[in-house]
């Protein structure tokens, strides 16, 4: 009887104190219907410099089709293409190759008849590389480097004065081919999640391209041969639930593009994060934070290079840093400069934290406390200046399903 009472007590405790988001809002460590690669960076001037490698994996015994979208750090889609995956297939791509005009060619010799339009020469995922050269290639690099290019005087990203291309990538399971699309003046990239005029994520019961099939996982490498460093971490799986989300006013991963009506069916990411930091001892390179965040805006317009997007800057509601004894060493409130755009890498040392070792917690939100929360993803990278480095995903303190858009 004692054992029965103890078991019941433990069951009751587990049901009342377990984090709600562990059950209600799946985050990471499982296949998803979409993948987020929260940040990439490529040195476009040094072929032996920093680059980013990603892999997309199909955890399914069926062939799958995916749509890869490359976004700038202003959340402007600049390139999109289809990626065919055989059962349990793995496709790896080096972003330097992509910026040189070479996108993965997939599906050659496969039966593509189960995926509409994939056999069409205009939409096939089989490519003869390079698929774009000269000014088109230079324009893509310009969009991702925050400068005007040979074909466009407007900008699609933040200028950081080092000729490096930056942005993030999403991958969605789709059920038909849409072809290769490259942003050019007057030619929007149509087949991407932001386009609600075309049913990428159609309304409930309607025509659509993206589907709910939680079969994707992946990984992400930052490789710098010249700097003698490398880091790697898993991609962020975005889990879909075709029965859960229905608008209006429901927060989903892609909800900003459809007025938060839930049509993409993808769980949102957390809004409150905690991570440790190291800046000293063996870790002479300190800690950088990669932070991806939701702009909460449907705007994807190119803008004047000195103007920037209409939603900038994005606010950090608060940041509290503590030393290893738990004492507060830095406290910031309603900061507009810490992580102001859709994706970025920020040095912890630049924040001016009054300790070399400790932990920090911060909220991605639009007001002075926790109102208007925005989903995001946080990844700390700790380096030792050319000897070794490590990275891992930060710890979510809440979940996106508990907030309202």
Image: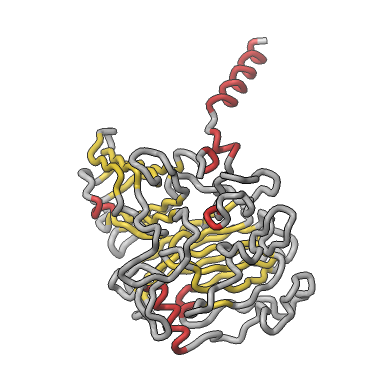
Q: Is residue 369 depicted above or below 239 in this figure?
A: above
Q: Say whether residue 327 is visible.
A: yes
Image location (x, y in percent) of residue 20: 55, 33
Image location (x, y in percent) of residue 231: 41, 61
Nearer to the camera, 396 or 167: 167
Nearer to the camera, 231 or 85: 85
Kindly identify the residue that appears in the image at 33 percent across and 74 percent down.
226
Count of picture labels: 0
Q: Say whether residue 221 is visible.
A: no
Q: Is residue 46 depicted above or below 13 in this figure?
A: below
Left or right of 7 on screen, residue 147: left
Image location (x, y in percent) of residue 148: 36, 79
Farthest residue, direction top:
1
Kindly identify the residue that appears in the image at 30 percent across and 65 percent down.
386
Image location (x, y in percent) of residue 200: 64, 63
Left or right of 308 on screen, residue 295: right
Q: Is residue 5 depicted above or below 400 in this figure?
A: above
Left or right of 111 on screen, residue 324: left
Kindly identify the residue that appears in the image at 32 percent across and 42 percent down.
318
Kindly identify the residue that appears in the image at 34 percent across and 80 percent down.
45
Nearer to the camera, 340 or 284: 340
Quarter of the figure that contains the N terminus = top right
Farthest residue, direction bottom:
134
Colouring convention used in this rendered image of the protein: secondary structure
Q: Quadrant of residue 324?
A: top left
């Amino acid at each position: 009887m004692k054992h029965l009472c103890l078991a019941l007590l433990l069951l009751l405790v587990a049901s009342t104190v377990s984090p709600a988001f562990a059950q209600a809002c799946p985050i990471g460590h499982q296949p998803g219907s979409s993948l987020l690669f929260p940040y990439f960076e490529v040195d476009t001037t040094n072929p032996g410099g920093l680059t980013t490698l990603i892999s997309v994996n199909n955890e399914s015994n069926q062939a799958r089709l995916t749509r890869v979208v490359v976004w700038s750090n202003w959340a402007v889609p600049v390139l999109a293409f289809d990626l065919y995956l055989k059962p349990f297939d793995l496709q790896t791509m080096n972003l330097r190759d992509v910026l040189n005009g070479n996108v993965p060619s997939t599906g050659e010799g496969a039966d593509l008849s189960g995926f509409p339009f994939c056999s069409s020469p205009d939409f096939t995922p089989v490519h003869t590389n390079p698929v774009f050269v000269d000014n088109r290639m230079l324009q893509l690099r310009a969009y991702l480097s925050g400068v005007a290019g040979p074909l466009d005087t407007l900008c699609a990203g933040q200028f950081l004065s080092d000729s490096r291309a930056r942005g993030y990538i999403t991958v969605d399971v789709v059920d038909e081919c849409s072809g290769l699309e490259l942003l050019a003046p007057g030619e929007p990239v149509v087949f991407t999640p932001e386009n609600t005029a075309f049913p990428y994520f159609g309304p409930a019961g309607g025509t659509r391209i993206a589907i709910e099939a939680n079969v994707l996982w992946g990984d992400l490498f930052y490789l710098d041969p010249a700097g003698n460093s490398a880091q790697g971490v898993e991609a962020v799986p975005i889990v879909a639930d075709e029965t859960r989300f229905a608008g209006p006013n429901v927060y989903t991963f892609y909800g900003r593009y459809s007025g938060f009506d839930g049509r993409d069916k993808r769980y949102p990411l957390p809004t409150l994060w905690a991570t440790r930091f190291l800046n000293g001892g063996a870790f002479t390179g300190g800690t950088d934070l990669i932070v991806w965040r939701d702009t909460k805006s449907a705007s994807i317009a190119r803008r004047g290079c000195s103007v920037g997007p209409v939603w900038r800057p994005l606010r950090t509601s608060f940041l509290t840093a503590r030393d290893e004894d738990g004492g507060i060493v830095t406290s910031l409130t309603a900061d507009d400069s810490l992580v102001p755009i859709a994706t970025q890498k920020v040095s912890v040392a630049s924040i001016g934290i009054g300790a070399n070792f400790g932990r920090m917690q911060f909220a991605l939100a639009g007001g002075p406390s926790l109102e208007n929360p925005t989903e995001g993803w946080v990844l700390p990278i700790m380096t030792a200046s050319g000897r070794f480095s490590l990275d891992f995903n930060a710890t979510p303190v809440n979940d996106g399903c508990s907030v309202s858009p």
